[in-house]
Amino acid sequence: MKFGVVTFPGSNCNQDMVYVLKEKLNQEVVELWHKNTSIEGCDAIVLPGGFSYGDYLRSGAIARFSPLMKEVISHAQNGGIVIGVCNGFQILCESGLLPGALLHNNNQKFICKNVWLKAESKTARLTKNLHHDKAYKIPIAHGEGRYFANENILKDLNDNDQILFRYCNEAAEVSQDCNPNGSQENIAGICNKNKNVFGMMPHPERAADISLGNTDGLSIFESLLNTITA
């Protein structure tokens, strides 16, 4: 696959993503600047973590208007794969490609630590091939990661199998005790109805190298790749 990793002013996880996709997963990777007007024939677009435009107004609110986002939105609407991690998830919600919003953490503090995730969706490419009774250790680093949506959206997400991940404990048990930011229903990631746009707050690219003592994040990328090439 050919991946395009977008860099916005303030992105700081773009090179982490490029490294994992290229060096660990042996994929073709193109680095895309936010002012570009072409996605250069990429099969999948990745919006990485960071603090695009300094998180002014709201996280992702300004990046949504970057010139390249017009092409990213068109790519998604035509069935192309788009993945947003952390700030990328916020941008996807701001752009309307994913429902809901990411609000300030309920403790009003920036949180940076490892958390446990339980894969929920059994039909989305990003989670289809994961073990759904296993807890995956993936780090978070955000100040606005509290997922919020109204009751109708939450019902649709559950009914359509659009919830990718929920925060859980090491035994893969979901409860408020292991919810790091107050997200509704412990939601850590979702996809759109067509299941080609994926957003998650935790950083799988930061848990994809044995040198870091954790490769749980590789499984998430591999699930996507295996479902596409199968």
Image (cartoon, grey):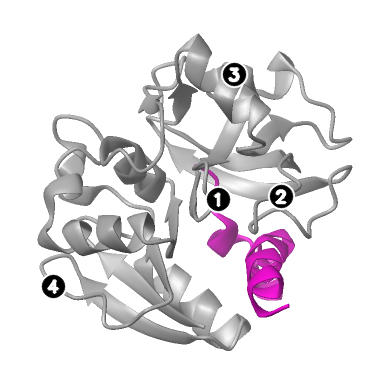
Is residue 116 placed above or below 18 in the rendered structure?
A: above
Q: Position of residue 215 (x, y in %)?
A: 72, 66
Question: Mark 1 and mark 3 in contact (Cβ < 8 Å)?
Answer: no
Image point (45%, 70%), residue name = 16
Earlier sequence position, callout 2 versus callout 3:
2
Q: Position of residue 72 (x, y in %)?
A: 28, 61
User: From mark 2 to mark 3, how far is it between C-alphas?
Assistant: 17 Å
Numbered disc 2: secondary structure = loop
The residue that disc 4 covers is: 36
Earlier sequence position, callout 4 versus callout 1:
4
User: From mark 1 to mark 2, how far is it between C-alphas?
Assistant: 8 Å
Indicate which disc residue 155 carries: 3
Look at the image and tell me in which quarter the C terminus lies: bottom right
Earlier sequence position, callout 1 versus callout 2:
2
Question: Mark 1 and mark 4 in contact (Cβ < 8 Å)?
Answer: no
The residue that disc 2 covers is: 123
Q: Is residue 220 left or right of residue 52?
A: right
Would residue 9 be seen by someone viewing this image from the given angle? no
- Kind of residue sitting beneath label 1: Lys
User: From mark 4 to mark 1, how far is it between C-alphas?
Assistant: 26 Å
Earlier sequence position, callout 3 versus callout 4:
4
User: From mark 3 to mark 4, how far is it between C-alphas?
Assistant: 37 Å
The residue that disc 1 covers is: 195
Name of the residue lying farthest toward the front:
78
Numbered disc 1: secondary structure = loop
Q: Nearer the viewer, mark 4 or mark 2?
A: 2
- Kind of residue sitting beneath label 2: Thr
Residue 221: image quadrant is: bottom right
